[in-house]
Image (spheres, rainbow, N blue to C red):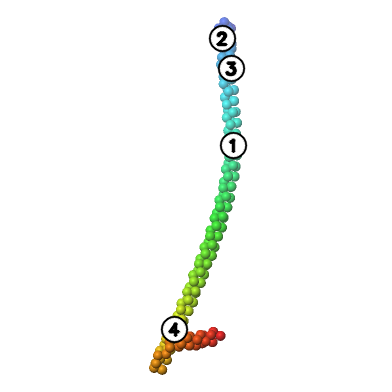
Amino acid sequence: MEGIGINIPLLIAFVINFIILFALLSFFAYKPITKMLEQRQAKIRESMEQAEKIRQETAHSEEEIKAHLEKARKEGQAIIAQATQIGERLKEEAKDGARQEAESVISKARTEIQRERDKAIEELRTEFADIAILAAEKVIKETVDKKKHRKLIDEVLKESTTFKKT
């Protein structure tokens, strides 16, 4: 084979070196590289499982948040409804209070008007009696007993008001 340019001892030395190198590489490099690849594969698998677990937890958290938001929305609506009812009740109470106060003021005013009217009538009677006595004195030209005439005039006025009322 030397004619074709192949040196057999050199070829055998290359083959032996290749086998030794292959054995050394498989012993020192192949096993650590496969071990490293298996560890990497385990880490990737573990990361995928953690990502799936996180995704599930996130979905669960979203559902809880939605439930809490819905509950808070309902509570808010209930509070608004309650505040509206309280506002309406306070408004009605204020109206009732104002109405009662107005009625009280009107009643007091009527009582005061009645008292003033009675006072004015009494004053008019007194003045009328005094005028009648003065007129009688001038007619008679002598002093008349004021007490008797006042009593007489009061009786006449009372009789005339009772006739007017009936």
Image point (60%, 31%), residue name: 49
Q: Label 1 to label 2, Cα distance in Å?
A: 57 Å
Q: Label 3 to label 1, Cα distance in Å?
A: 38 Å
Q: Identify the residue position indicated by label 4 in the image.
A: 126
Q: Are marks 1 and 2 in contact (CB under 8 Å)?
A: no
155 or 146, nearer to the observer: 146
Q: Nearer the viewer, mark 4 or mark 1?
A: 4
Label 4's element? Answer: helix
Q: Label 4 to label 1, Cα distance in Å?
A: 101 Å
Label 3's element? Answer: helix
Q: Which mark is residue 142?
A: none
Label 1's element? Answer: helix
Q: Residue 14: x and y, percent?
A: 56, 9
Check disc 3: other Cα within 10 Å, few if <14, some if 14-19, many if 20+.
Answer: few
Q: Nearer the viewer, mark 2 or mark 4?
A: 4
Q: Identify the residue position indicated by label 2 in the image.
A: 17
Q: Are marks 3 and 2 in contact (CB under 8 Å)?
A: no
Q: Which mark is residue 57?
A: 1
Q: Amino acid at mark 3?
A: Lys
Q: Nearer the viewer, mark 3 or mark 2?
A: 3
Q: Amino acid at mark 4?
A: Thr
Q: Amino acid at mark 2?
A: Asn
104 or 32, nearer to the observer: 104
Q: Are marks 3 and 4 in contact (CB under 8 Å)?
A: no
Q: Residue 47: x and y, percent?
A: 57, 30
Q: Amino acid at mark 1?
A: Glu
Q: Which is nearer the N-term, disc 4 or disc 1?
A: 1
Question: Which residue sits furthest bottom?
Answer: 140
Q: Label 3 to label 4, Cα distance in Å?
A: 138 Å
Q: Which is nearer the N-term, disc 2 or disc 4?
A: 2
Q: Identify the residue position indicated by label 3 in the image.
A: 31
